[in-house]
Image (tube, grey):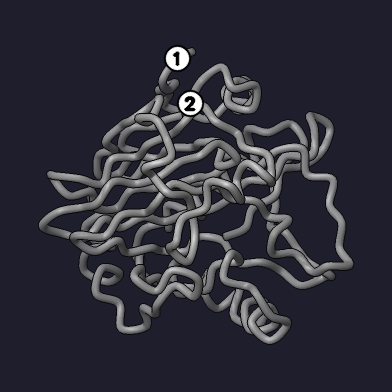
Amino acid sequence: MLATISADALAPQLIQDLLAHRVYGIRIPGFVSQPSLEAARAQLFDHPERGALGHAREFTRLGIAYAEVKTDEVRQAYHDAARANIQRVRNAFKPYVSPIDEFRLRLDEAWPRGAHLLDVDGQKCFTGVCRYQEPGIDLCPHIDKLEWNLPAHLQVNLQAQLSVNIYLQVPQQGGELEVWDIRPTAPEYRALKSDRHYGIDRDRLRPADFTTRPEDGDLIIINPRFIHAVRPVHTSPRITLSSFIGYFGEQSPLIFWS
């Protein structure tokens, strides 16, 4: 299996290669221009509205992530703030285009059936959460599944889920992305769970099958149904914009959410 496909543009075949697990990831180096990165450093890195991530409070983020939704009250707060949070991240890159907006536009153009924001019961979702991983903190091995956070009455025919990270700042040491060639079943995942409030006990896993260190401005897409993690960072925060992509089949639009 190839480690990653490097490309200068998105194409349906790249998505299909990732879905078929022929590669661990898709990388677009330098997706974010240097002027846009400088705008983010000035306006986003020390944003006064950063808050603690609801299910992993050692991380801070700008914008509520759907993975934080555990109650109907939090779900409604998420949807109520969705468009304002999109605009908040968008404003942080002015006078340049937000990288998450550019990604959404490029994928909508590239995918034959287009791509759009996920809605849940007619309410739009947020996409483009900005996450701050501070020195000494790791993102422990875990998987991501939209179905864990959807309302109990709502069933989706999601065939696959992909994860997009746009790297605004990666420290010189640490912050490597790790992926294991392991897609656990629900019982297997429960058996691997750690004493931490989320994720897997790293000691129960072999060394990662794929490890890469992103560079500032890179965009990387992986399949988060396979176990993945981020090593601890050193000296300075690791800052990313993130989104998920939902796949319903070749003849359906893709969907975005964070």
Q: Quadrant of residue 7?
A: top left
Q: Position of residue 156 (x, y in %)?
A: 84, 52
Left/right placement of residue 83 relative to residue 49 reads right
Q: Quadrant of residue 60?
A: bottom left
Q: Position of residue 210 (x, y in %)?
A: 38, 26
Q: For the point 30% across and 69% down, which residue is it?
A: 44
Q: Position of residue 38 (x, y in %)?
A: 21, 58
Residue 87 seen in this snapshot: no
Amino acid on which disc 1 is placed: Leu
Structural crowding at the residue carrying mark 1, measured as other residues with C-alpha within 10 Å and reported as few (<14), some (14–19) or many (≥20): few
Towards the viewer: 220 or 37? 220
Structural crowding at the residue carrying mark 2, measured as other residues with C-alpha within 10 Å and reported as few (<14), some (14–19) or many (≥20): many
Left/right placement of residue 205 relative to residue 87 reads left
Task: Look at the picture and state if 230 lies above or below 22.
Answer: below
Tag 1, which secondary structure?
strand
Which residue bears the numbered disc 1?
Answer: 2
Q: For the point 30% across and 77% down, which residue is it?
A: 47
Towards the viewer: 172 or 178? 178
Q: Residue 24's mark?
A: 2
Q: For the point 51% across and 26% down, which residue is it?
A: 181
Left/right placement of residue 26 relative to residue 45 reads right
Towards the viewer: 27 or 34? 27
Tag 2, which secondary structure?
strand
Q: Quadrant of the C terminus?
A: bottom right
Q: Position of residue 140 (x, y in %)?
A: 39, 51
